[in-house]
Amino acid sequence: MEWPKIEIDPNKDQDWCFGCGPNNPIGLKLKFKWDEETRTACADFTPDVRLQGWAGFLHGGIAACIMDEAIGWASMFAGTNNVTAKMQVRYRRMIALNQTYTVACRITRQNPRLIETAAWISDSGGTVFAEAVSTQYIFSKREVKNKNG
């Protein structure tokens, strides 16, 4: 199999990332934490009307974006630079605005070139609203400096 050639500077302009960048005025500004024991990255978020799809509910594309961000962070916490190669999303329930949710992602399998993950969005009671499985393509190893975001 021929692997794609990817030229990305992982240290350039990360403060403008739509998912986690603190300088992006329209971004989500998600802040992830890592649990080494469970190999899970998670962040809390509260969607508001700016992220609306149907009236009163989070847009499904934004829900997918939030899970994709968690997927990326889990892979980075595991010590890699990566991009999403494939992601499959399942929406279980509508995600109401102005309520707090947790997005989490666990690494399910890893080899030298690929990381497989499972991500989900849940409320404080543990109800799952959306879930995703993905494959991440690893384009380089990284030095992990701070695993608690």
Image (spheres, rainbow, N blue to C red):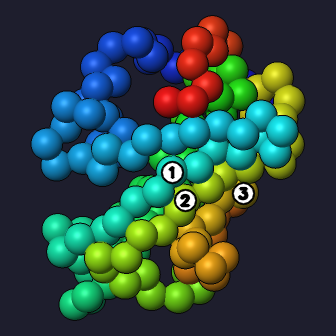
Q: Are marks 1 and 2 in contact (CB under 8 Å)?
A: yes
Q: Residue 118 carries which label?
A: 3
Horizontal placement of 6 versus 19: left or right? right
Do callouts 1 and 3 mark residues in contact (Cβ within 8 Å)?
A: no
Q: Residues within 10 Å of mark 1 (few under 14, many from 20)?
A: some
**Circle 1 SS class:** strand
**Image quadrant in which the N terminus is located:** top right
Residue at which label 1 appears: 43
User: As shown in the figure, which amino acid type bears the numbered disc 3?
Assistant: Ala
In this view, which residue lies farthest toward the top?
143
How far is disc 1 from disc 3 in space, using C-alphas? 15 Å
Crowding at label 3, few (<14), some or many (≥20) Cα neighbours within 10 Å?
A: many
Q: Which of marks 3 and 2 is in front?
A: 2
Name the residue tied to disc 2. Answer: 103
Q: Where is residue 7 in the image (x, y as percent from the top left)?
A: 46, 14
Tell which residue pokes out farthest to the front in this image: 124
86 left or right of 1?
Answer: left
- Give how far apart the Cα atoms at labels 3 and 2 are: 11 Å
41 vs 140: above or below: below
Viewer-nearest residue: 61 or 38: 38
- In percent of the image, x 58 and y 49: which residue is there? 42
In front of the other: label 1 or label 3? 1
**Quarter where residue 40 is shown:** top right
Viewer-side residue, 82 vs 45? 45
Say whether disc 1 or disc 2 marks the residue closer to the N-terminus: 1
